Image: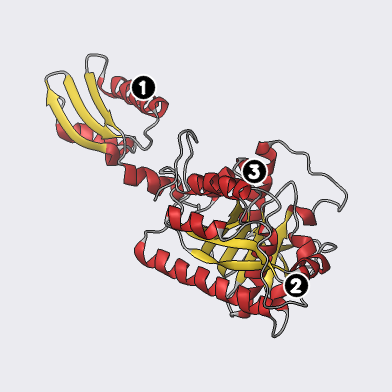
Amino acid sequence: MLDKTKIQEFLKEIEVDDLVNNIQIMGNDVYLDMTAHSPAMHEKKKLETAMKQSFATEFGEHINLKLKIASPEPTEIQQNQIKGKQVPGIKNIIAIASGKGGVGKSTVAANLAVTLAKMNFKVGILDADIYGPSIPTMFDTEKEKPTSVESGGKNLMQPIENYGVKMLSIGYFSGANQAVVWRGPMASKALHQLLRDANWGELDFLLIDLPPGTGDIHLSVIQEVPVTGAVIVSTPQHVALADVRKGIAMFTMESINIPVLGLIENMAYFTPEELPENKYYIFGRQGAQYLAEDLGIPILGEIPLIQSIREASDSGRPAALQENSKIVEIYREITQKMVESLVERNKNLPPTEAVKITTMAGCSPKK
C-alpha cells in the first residue's frame, strides 16, 4: 500500500524533497507540486523525466505520477544569478562611459581615480577598452607587466600600481604596436580574467573605463559584475549628446537598471592662458547640462579645454596630481559630487545585481 510517508522517504533518498511543496495520493495516482531550480523549459522537462523514471523504478509502472512543476519566484532567480558575481573586497564598481569616442573619457577616468586616491580612498581602475587601451600610457606604466601571486590557493594577476591606484589593462599584455584583433567572445573572456583572476584586494572604488558607445564589452561588464553606478562623459556638441542619450538609455533599461550617478561635460569651454577671464565655447554651450536636466540626472561639473590636461595625460602623470592648480580644484569638486551622488544612490536604492541580458531592443531612457 503506497502512502505519503513512503513517498517522503523516497524523495529524501533522491534529494528532491526540498523541491516538493505538496503530496496527494488517490489510488494509483500520485500528485506532486514541485518548484524547479531554473525557469528554463528544458530544465523543467529534465526534472519531469527523471522523476517519472525514478518513481517507476521504485514503485512500479502501475503508479501514475502527476507532476505540477512551477518556476522559481523572480527574487530567487535573481539571487541565483548573482551568486559568485560579487568581486570580493570591492565595495563600489563605477562604470565610466561615453556615447562616442574622442570626448576625453579615459582622461577623465584617470583623473577621477587619482583624485579619489588623494582623498584617501582605496582605488583601482580597469581598462575595459580592449581594442584601444590607454590607461598604461596615462599612468606611465606602459613597460610594466603584471606579476603572478598566490591567493586562496589560486594564482592571480597582481595589478600594476602607480599614484596610489591599482590598474589592469590588456595593454600590459600586448605590445605597443600590436593590434588586438579579437571577436566579441574572446574580448569578453579577457575582460572576465582581468576582473576575476586578479588580486585587487580591498578597494573602496573600482572604476571601469569602458570603450565608447554600447556593445559587447558593455554587456560583458554588466553581466559579469554588479555595477554600482555609471558616470557619463560628453562634450557639449549636439553629435556627442545624441550618442550620450543612447548610452544613458542602455544603463536605464529595465533589464539593466544601473543608476547614472551623473554627467560630466568635458572640453566645456576654452580659456586662453593670456586671457584667464575669457571663456570661448568652441563646441557649444552647456549642452550636457541641458541634457542632464532633460533626463533628470545630476550634472557633476564642467572641465575646460586646457592644454596641460592633455600634456599631463600624454606624459603619464594625470593633471589632477598637480599642486595648487585650477585643474586640481575642478577635479576635486567633480569627484566630491560623484561620491555624494553615490552615497545618495546607496542610501535610497538596493544593491545593483549582475544581470542576464536577453534583448537590447526597444530601450528608452527613464526620466
Tell me, yes or no, whether the two marked residues, 1 and 2, touch with CB atoms within 8 Å. no
* Residue pictured at 37% horizontal, 24% vertical: 45
Q: In this rendering, which labeled residue sits more in front, label 1 or label 2?
A: 2
> Between 79 and 354, which is closer to the camera in this rendering?
354
Q: Which residue position holds label 2?
A: 272
Provide residue 167's location: percent of width, then percent of height.
Answer: 70, 64
Indicate left or right for 306 with 115 as reference. right
Q: CA distance from mark 1 to mark 2?
A: 76 Å
Residue furthest out toward the bottom: 324
Sequence order check: which comes first, mark 1 or mark 2?
1
* Residue pictured at 62% horizontal, 49% vertical: 240
Q: In this rendering, which labeled residue sits more in front, label 3 or label 1?
A: 3
289 lies above or below 214: below
Sequence order check: which comes first, mark 3 or mark 2?
3
Q: Look at label 1 and name its amino acid.
A: Thr
Rendered image: mark on residue 188:
3
Residue 95 image-quadrant placement: bottom right
Residue furthest out toward the right: 177
